[in-house]
C-alpha cells in the first residue's frame, strides 16, 4: 500500500503543467494557464513567486485570495486548468513564478518565468524596421551580433559584424565613432515577431540586452524617414558564443531569471524516498529471516 501511494505521488507531478516561459509587455496584461489532472480537481490551486517552490510567496489562491491588487486566479474544474491574469505589468513583476497545488504531504508545482519586455519595437508586415544598439567605449573593437531567442543563453545568432553583414533580409553595421551598431530587418513577416538580443562578444562572457519585436498586420506608410528604435547599453551577461552560434550563459550579478539554474530539491528527495521504500521490505525480510531461521549459515560458520 505504501508503495502504491508513493508511486502515485511520483506520477502526480506529471499531471501538472505550465508554460515554462511567459513574455509580457510593460503596462500590459498577461495570462498564464496551468493544467492539472483530474485527481487535483478539488484541491486548492495557487500562484506564487520565488526561486524555488518551497520558498515562494503566495500571490493568489483559489480558496480565499482570488484577487490581489493587479493579479487574479480562477479555476475551471471542468477543463482541468486554472488561469492567472496579471494586469498593468511592472518591471518588478519579472521573475520566477510557480503554478502550485496544495497536497497533504507536499505541494505539487511547476515553474514559469515571466519576462517583462521593456524595450519594444513595432514593425509592419512587408516593411522594414531598424534597431540601434548603444554600447560603451570599451566595446568599440568587439564583435557585435543580433540573435533571437526567449533566453539569451539559448538564442541563435542571425547576423554578426565579423561575418557576412547581411543574412536572410537582416543586415548589421557598426558605427564605432558613435558607439552604436544598427540592425535592419526587411520584409517583415508575422512569424518574425518575438524576442531578440543586441549582443557583444567578449572573452569571458558576452553582453546583451533584449528587444521584443511586435509585427502588426497591414501596411505602414512612413512620413519622412524610416523610424529607428534605440536600445540602451547592454545589461545581461553570458558566456562567449561558440562556433555553432549558440550562446552559453554563465553567472551574472543580479541575474536570477531564466539564466539561473535552480534545482528542485524535492525532485531528488522523492526518488531517494522511492528507492528507500523499495529496499525497506527486502531488508526487513532478510533481517527477520536471519534472526528467526538463520538464513545465512555460511556467515555463522565463518564466525565460528
Image (tube, helix red, strand yellow):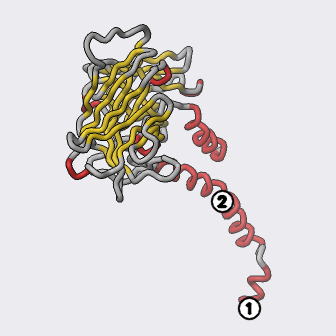
Looking at the picture, how far across and down is residue 16, in whole percent?
53, 31
Q: Mark 2 points at which residue?
A: 279
- Quick one: which residue is furthest to the bottom in this view? 304
Q: Residue at x 55, y 37 (%)?
A: 13
Q: Name the residue under label 1.
A: 304
Mark 2 closeness class: few <14, some 14–19, many ≥20 residues within 10 Å: few
Residue visible at 46% across and 18% down?
Answer: 75
Q: Position of residue 261 (x, y in %)?
A: 42, 49
Q: Is mark 1 on a helix, strand or loop?
A: loop
Q: Is residue 46 visible?
A: no
User: Which residue appears at 60% of the width and 52% of the height?
Assistant: 274
Q: Residues within 10 Å of mark 1 (few under 14, many from 20)?
A: few
Q: Is residue 304 left or right of residue 21?
A: right
Q: Residue at x 41, y 33 (%)?
A: 171
Name the quadrant of the N terminus: top right
> Dividing the picture into quarters, in which one does residue 211 lie?
top left
Amino acid at each position: 500500500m505504501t508503495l502504491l501511494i508513493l508511486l502515485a505521488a511520483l506520477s502526480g507531478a506529471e499531471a501538472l503543467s505550465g508554460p515554462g516561459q511567459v513574455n509580457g509587455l510593460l503596462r500590459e496584461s498577461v495570462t498564464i494557464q496551468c493544467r492539472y489532472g483530474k485527481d487535483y480537481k478539488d484541491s486548492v490551486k495557487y500562484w506564487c513567486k520565488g526561486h524555488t517552490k518551497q520558498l515562494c510567496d503566495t500571490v493568489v489562491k483559489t480558496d480565499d485570495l482570488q484577487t490581489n491588487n493587479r493579479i487574479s486566479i480562477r479555476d475551471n474544474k471542468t477543463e482541468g486548468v486554472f488561469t492567472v491574469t496579471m494586469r498593468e505589468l511592472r518591471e518588478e513583476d519579472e521573475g520566477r513564478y510557480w503554478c502550485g497545488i496544495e497536497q497533504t504531504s507536499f505541494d505539487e508545482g511547476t515553474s514559469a518565468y515571466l519576462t517583462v519586455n521593456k524595450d519594444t519595437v513595432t514593425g509592419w508586415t512587408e516593411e522594414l524596421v531598424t534597431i540601434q544598439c548603444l554600447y560603451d567605449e570599451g566595446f568599440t573593437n568587439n564583435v557585435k551580433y543580433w540573435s533571437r531567442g526567449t533566453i539569451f543563453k539559448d538564442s541563435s545568432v542571425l547576423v554578426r559584424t565579423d561575418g557576412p553583414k547581411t543574412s536572410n533580409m537582416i543586415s548589421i553595421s557598426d558605427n564605432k565613432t558613435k558607439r552604436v551598431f544598427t540592425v535592419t530587418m526587411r520584409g517583415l513577416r508575422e512569424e518574425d515577431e518575438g524576442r531578440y538580443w543586441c549582443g557583444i562578444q567578449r572573452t569571458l562572457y558576452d553582453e546583451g540586452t533584449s528587444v521584443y519585436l511586435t509585427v502588426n498586420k497591414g501596411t505602414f506608410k512612413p512620413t519622412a524617414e524610416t523610424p529607428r528604435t534605440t536600445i540602451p547599453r547592454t545589461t545581461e551577461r553570458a558566456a562567449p558564443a561558440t562556433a555553432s552560434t549558440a550562446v552559453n550563459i554563465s553567472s551574472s550579478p543580479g541575474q536570477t531569471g531564466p539564466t539561473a539554474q535552480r534545482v528542485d530539491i524535492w525532485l531528488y528527495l522523492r526518488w531517494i524516498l522511492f528507492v528507500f521504500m523499495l529496499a525497506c521490505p527486502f531488508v526487513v525480510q532478510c533481517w527477520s529471516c536471519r534472526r528467526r531461521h538463520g538464513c545465512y549459515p555460511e556467515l555463522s560458520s565463518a564466525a565460528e
